Amino acid sequence: MLTQIHKLSRTRRVCKSMVIISLFLSIILILIFSINPCSQTTQILIPNFNLNYFKNTQTTPTNISHVVFGITGTVKTWHTKKHYIESWWRPNVTRGFLFLDETPIEHLPWPPTSPPVRVSGDHKGTPYTIRMARVIQGTFKAENKNVRWYVMTDDDTIFFLENLLNVLKKYDHEGYYYIGTNSESILSNTWFSFDMGFGGAGFALSYPLAEALAKNLDVCLNKYQYLHTSDHILRSCIADFGVSLTQEKGFHQIDLRGDISGLLSAHPQTPLVSLHHLDAVEPLFPATDRQQSLNHLMTSAKTDQSRLLQQSICYHHPKNWTFSLSWGYSVHIYEKTLPSCFLQLPLQTFEEWEKGGWPAFMVNTRGLSQDPCEIPHVFYFYSVEESGGGGWRREVVTTYVRRLPRRLLPCLVNGNHSADYVDKILVISPVKRLVTEGSRRECCDIIQVEKENSTTIKLRPCMKYEMTW
Ligand SMILES: *[C@@H]1O[C@H](CO)[C@@H](O)[C@H](O)[C@H]1NC(C)=O
Ligand SMILES: *[C@@H]1O[C@H](CO)[C@@H](O)[C@H](O)[C@H]1NC(C)=O
Ligand SMILES: *[C@@H]1O[C@H](CO)[C@@H](O)[C@H](O)[C@H]1NC(C)=O
Ligand SMILES: *[C@@H]1O[C@H](CO)[C@@H](O)[C@H](O)[C@H]1NC(C)=O
Ligand SMILES: *[C@@H]1O[C@H](CO)[C@@H](O)[C@H](O)[C@H]1NC(C)=O
């Protein structure tokens, strides 16, 4: 008993002295580090960081000549995809190549309005997945002088170049960036990855990351040969370089079917960068075919790409109406005052890519009820013009027309004010380009309600503390 107590007190003494010694050591260490905070390891890391920092402040702004596109397609389907590429490709301005599986003999001479062609795959019969993954390597080999970004994409993807540049400009092209988006479909993301930049939406790789991939592609193809798509192989390889996806909501894979007008009428507040799968969905505008629809959207894109699909919400209090605008695409009128958080939810006009998942979509949606208070009067973009309004100030006027009558009784919750008679809406917007980053949605005023059955809306910056509802 006694010896045990003795042992115990000895252990305590030893413990006590150990605590004192370690305290003393820590104080010394803290002192050393506060005098010289740059330990050996941090010194190794800092110069790299500083170098980038200084370089970056001196580089010129990123323009279209710094971006190289690697587009994947097949000879067989080229004639059905050609107009998608030609809707955005700018000959002698955009850099890059269309990689086909074979020489497009029946399409020669190759049209100068399309990207230059390369034949990908080492030999005939290379699996499509491998061929697509090799596109990054082929693109890098062919174009690597004065390049900041490589954009990998499919032959049925549409780009909005000015917006793409504005998104890329936010990032340091000397860092390791993998920028894009996952699918709208939860099932697709579950099968592949929520952290994958889907190839149809297109994704951007900064120069250093593209270089790293191009130089190590064989290793990656070997490691991940069991994966079924090239974007999945690349994502897995990119993960091995320690890089993860930077999500940008303006890229759109469109893993959806049917009528996507609900989605395009409630776009997030970010520039529209890409659209994909337009073959799989209904034409973007009613009573037109797919190609006409795309050309039509491109006319508003040409005038003011920065505002394209940007949502603005305003109210006409004398009638208790709500207007929701998607610039260059649609205007909705509700016969009820509804809050922004509700109008930001896309109307679920579209269907799942693959049935069976619940919830199905990566966004909250609103069902198509038969409630006349929640079903809007829909107007689609019709025309755009620039006009000289009030002396030196010029404005853009977009017009939206009703394609179909609503065929519902009026909403009676906020009075009895039918909007059935409105057949045209004019939207006046400033010529000044919109900056979405770090700013608010534009506010709007209803400046005229029923002159000749048309309504006029004017966009303006929101005022300090202004709440739309
Ligand atoms: C893009 O920027 C480079 C400088 O980095 C400049 O030399 C070039 O002329 C610019 N190109 C265009 C199309 O603005
Ligand atoms: C592109 O540039 C080449 C050579 O400068 C010229 O011959 C050709 O006409 C240009 N193509 C277009 C579509 O502008
Ligand atoms: C608008 O709605 C409010 C709340 O329902 C109602 O009190 C008001 O009378 C309505 N205004 C008109 C002009 O109908
Ligand atoms: C709503 O107004 C219309 C036209 O003014 C009228 O015919 C209708 O009876 C009204 N409905 C109700 C429920 O008051
Ligand atoms: C306005 O709409 C009403 C009802 O739809 C119609 O009777 C009238 O002719 C229209 N007026 C004009 C100027 O278009």
Image: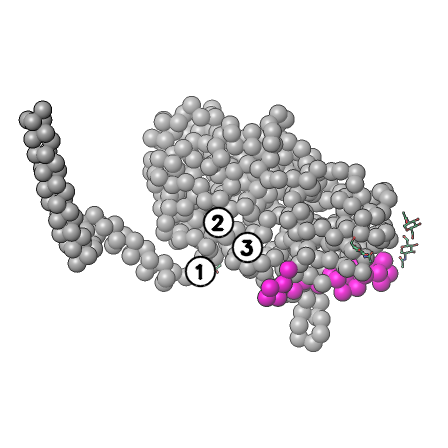
Query: Which residue extends farthest bottom?
Result: 391
Q: For the N terminus, give its image quadrant.
A: top left
Mark 3 lies on a secondary structure that is helix
The residue lying at 73 percent from left, 44 percent from top is 285
Residue 111 in sight here: no
Picture coordinates of residue 182, whole percent (x, y): 52, 38
Mark 1 lies on a secondary structure that is loop
First along the sequence among labels 1 and 3: 1
Q: Circle 3 sits on which residue?
A: 162
Q: Circle 2 sits on which residue?
A: 95
Q: Circle 1 sits on which residue?
A: 61
CA gap between label 3 and label 2 equals 14 Å
Per the image, is 357 magenta? no
First along the sequence among labels 2 and 1: 1
Picture coordinates of residue 68, whole percent (x, y): 46, 47
Residue type at mark 1 is Pro
The residue lying at 40 percent from left, 51 percent from top is 173
Q: Which mark is in front, 3 or 2?
A: 3
